[in-house]
Image: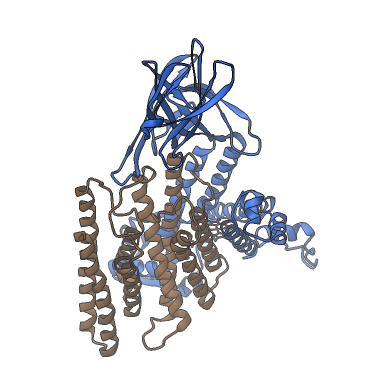
């Protein structure tokens, strides 16, 4: 498709030879460029799935030779979707879209204002045509109730249907730009980051993921009241729920159960359930007193100092155990292991006090994902527009019917640029109703 | 063994039977056989639908309760169902026995793989939390309708390349069919990708994360956009367009299988 430009000079004068700008415009608005760019982006994306993205140098070197890795780094194949050339290709596609669509769109708007009635010869040449002898336009107008009157002249009429179909391509092209702009807004003004909370814990900022790991204030605080995981009999997680409270200036303003697929949205910040984990809690009996220690937890009473140093799920195959550090009478630091499943190692005497490990509990913490994306509504709008545009483009189509009074009667002729098959059927039906052959 | 598995195994044999019925038609060229083929196709489709419904009911019996769209077995069965659906919906334009024969062959391939391969787990599995969403249904439905339409486009392309004289539909009809199937497939794939993105936003907090499955569906989508532009803006026809529809389907198949088996990512459970 060439952008037809009126290079018609004055009579006798040769048309001016196209300048560099003309060439650039021609290139930027060509469908050939669009096809090349789409192919390029597709191939680049294939590389982006074949080569692991954003991995560490060690990972690459365990997979590729040193020289291959150098090439991968040089071409940016280790992070295709953020590389300059990929973003450059997408920017060029956007330019291409604008340069291609805008002039066509303007031309379409202009052409709408001036629908020309083809002359009799052109009408005669149309494939779909029939002549109603001895009739006037007004006699048959009733048959075309479902068509819009595009033009009403003395002795001729232009009828249209599905004219929205002609604008659909521009809706689709515009929505691509809208979606990309929405994405850009998210990249520029949004952030994402993980947030873990133990029961009772409160946090009011998140470390954003990305090159600059800066702390982003949420603008409010979030407190985990409770966290529950339930499992299927097969052991797979069925549901996990964080019951949280949103605090503003220390006051609770909102309570919500965050589940997978059911995030909390507050002041433009979305908080998602993404994972969970657990920390061991060691339940001791120290001289008759019940004591719960987390990892690194400390107990102190009189001379007795206990510190939970290390946790092992399995100590030499004897089951879970915890290493406790304490200070001897003479000031010497000492460590000893308590094993939950071995009776002999469950109870010990430290500085004359009996210390017994009663249980090791799992204390779940929740893994939340915090994200702020002010562009997301722009993206949603783009999604809606593209789906609407595609539907209109493929399932409505524009067709025109001309009614012209000629000496013998009324000439009915129709054209459609798309779906010619369908229009032919439609026209045959109309012919039946009109009773013309 | 679940009742639904048995029904679906029978359906698999029905597709095989349909394939042979087509061969009988080509041998005898009797219109009666073709009428019979269509009746048999409706019966097969009805039973196939019943198999899916029964599986859905059975999942509630097991107190798991979800639509049969969530593991690899179910997605294969659903792909087969979508192909039948497309063939029936597009009956008016798909009257070519060669096309319905190959469509049945493709459905047979998916059904047979699902029913008789030992590597495909046929059990009803509970849904992990991320999949417990209404977006799952619409996402999987739109994607597989798209995949099925692209299968039809692939067949149209294949036939116009091989050009088997006597049994072939005329070239223009093949081009029209090719375009019509992409015309259904492209908006459906778009809807599939977009609903997937919306779902990902609500489940993970990000509508796009360049995970391999997402990226491959985008590659496929870009490819069909390229197809449309080559066809309409550049006026490509014949062999070149046929070739594009074959490459496009290869991309579909890679998006569906290749990513699960070769690359891994969020979708590694093969839901879609
Ligand atoms: C990913 C990006 C794009 C998408 C999804 C897209 C989508 C579409 C769709 C759906 C159609 C209608 C095809 C039909 O009616 O069968 C179309 C037509 C068209 N597109 Fe695009 N397009 C994209 C990029 C571009 C670009 C970059 C250009 C720049 C040259 C372009 C130029 C055109 C032209 C000239 C037409 C034909 C309009 C007509 O037939 O009147 N497209 N596009």
Provide the letter of the chain coloured blue: A
State the residue in front, A301 or A405: A301
Give the percent coordinates (x, y) of residue B126: 30, 48
Q: Chain B is drawn in which colour?
A: brown
Identify the image quadrant of the C terminus of chain B.
bottom left
Residue at image location 60% in from the left, 34% down from the top: A189
B54 is higher (above) or lower (below) than A298: below
As drawn, the residue found furthest toward the top would be: A302
Quarter of the image containing the N terminus of chain B?
bottom left
Which residue is found at the position 41% from the left and 39% from the top?
A318
Residue B79, given in percent of the width and then of the height, sits at: 34, 63
Quadrant for ligand 1 reads bottom right
| Above or below for B83 versus A197 | below
Viewer-closest of B13 and A68: A68
Q: In this view, does B222 lie to the left or right of B257?
A: right
Instruction: Tell me which residue sits at (34%, 53%) in the image.
Output: B70
The percent position of residue A81, horizontal first and vertical second, equals: 61, 51
């Amino acid at each position: 498709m060439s952008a037809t430009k009126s290079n018609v000079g004055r009579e006798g004068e040769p048309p001016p030879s196209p300048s560099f700008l003309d060439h650039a415009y021609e290139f930027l608005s060509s469908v050939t460029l669009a096809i090349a760019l789409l192919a390029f982006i597709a191939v680049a994306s294939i590389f982006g799935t074949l080569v692991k993205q954003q991995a560490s140098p060690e990972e690459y070197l365990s997979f590729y030779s040193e020289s291959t890795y150098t090439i991968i780094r040089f071409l940016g194949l280790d992070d295709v979707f953020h590389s300059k050339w990929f973003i450059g290709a997408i920017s060029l596609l956007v330019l291409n879209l604008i340069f291609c669509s805008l002039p066509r769109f303007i031309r379409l708007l202009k052409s709408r204002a001036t629908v020309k009635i083809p002359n009799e010869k052109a009408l005669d040449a149309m494939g779909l045509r029939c002549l109603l002898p001895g009739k006037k336009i007004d006699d048959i107008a009733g048959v075309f109730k479902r068509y819009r009157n595009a033009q009403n002249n003395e002795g001729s009429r232009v009828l249209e249907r599905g004219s929205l179909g002609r604008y659909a391509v521009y809706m689709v092209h515009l929505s691509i730009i809208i979606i990309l702009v929405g994405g850009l807004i998210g990249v520029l003004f949004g952030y994402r980051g993980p947030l873990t909370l133990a029961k009772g814990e409160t946090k009011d900022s998140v470390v954003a993921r990305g090159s600059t790991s800066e702390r982003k204030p949420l603008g409010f605080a979030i407190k985990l009241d409770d966290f529950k995981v339930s499992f299927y009999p097969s052991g797979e997680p069925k549901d996990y729920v964080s019951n949280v409270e949103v605090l503003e200036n220390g006051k609770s303003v909102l309570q919500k159960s965050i589940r997978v697929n059911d995030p909390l949205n507050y002041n433009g910040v979305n908080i998602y359930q993404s994972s969970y984990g657990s920390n061991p809690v060691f339940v001791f009996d120290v001289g008759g007193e019940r004591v719960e220690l987390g990892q690194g937890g400390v107990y102190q009473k009189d001379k007795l100092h206990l510190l939970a140093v290390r946790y092992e799920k399995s100590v030499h195959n004897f089951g879970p155990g915890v290493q406790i550090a304490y200070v001897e009478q003479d000031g010497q630091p000492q460590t000893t292991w308590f094993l939950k499943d071995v009776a002999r190692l469950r109870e010990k005497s430290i500085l004359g006090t009996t210390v017994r490990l009663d249980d090791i509990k799992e204390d779940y913490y929740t893994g939340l994902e915090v994200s702020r994306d002010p562009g997301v509504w722009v993206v949603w709008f783009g999604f809606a527009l593209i789906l609407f545009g595609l539907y209109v483009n493929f399932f409505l189509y524009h067709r025109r019917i001309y009614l012209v009074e000629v000496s013998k009667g009324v000439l009915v002729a129709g054209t459609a640029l798309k779906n010619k098959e369908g229009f032919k059927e439609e026209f045959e039906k109309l012919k039946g109703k009109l009773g013309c052959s | 063994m679940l009742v639904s598995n048995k029904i679906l195994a029978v359906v698999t044999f029905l597709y095989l039977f349909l394939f042979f019925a087509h061969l009988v038609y080509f041998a005898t060229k009797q219109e009666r056989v073709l009428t019979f083929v269509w009746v048999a196709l409706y019966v097969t489709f009805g039973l196939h639908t019943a198999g899916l419904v029964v599986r859905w009911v059975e999942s509630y019996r097991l107190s798991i309760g979800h639509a049969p769209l969530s593991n690899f077995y179910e997605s294969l069965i659903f792909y087969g169902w979508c192909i039948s659906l497309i063939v029936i919906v597009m009956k008016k334009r798909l009257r070519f026995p060669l096309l319905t024969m190959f469509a049945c062959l493709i459905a047979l391939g998916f059904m047979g793989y699902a029913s008789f391969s030992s590597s495909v787990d046929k059990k009803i599995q509970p849904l992990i939390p991320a999949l417990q969403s209404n977006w799952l249904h619409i996402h999987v439905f739109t994607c597989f309708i798209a995949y099925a339409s692209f299968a039809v486009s692939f067949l149209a392309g294949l036939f116009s390349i091989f050009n088997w004289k006597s049994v072939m539909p005329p070239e223009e009809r093949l081009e029209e069919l090719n375009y019509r199937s992409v015309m259904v497939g492209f908006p459906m794939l778009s809807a599939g990708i977009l609903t997937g993105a919306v779902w990902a936003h609500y489940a993970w907090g990000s509508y796009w994360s360049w995970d391999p499955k997402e990226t491959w569906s985008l590659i496929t989508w870009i490819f069909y956009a390229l197809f449309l532009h080559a066809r309409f803006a550049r006026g490509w026809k014949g062999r070149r367009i046929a070739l594009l529809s074959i490459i496009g389907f290869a991309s579909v198949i890679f998006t569906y299988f290749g990513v699960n088996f070769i690359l891994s990512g969020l979708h590694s459970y093969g839901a879609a």
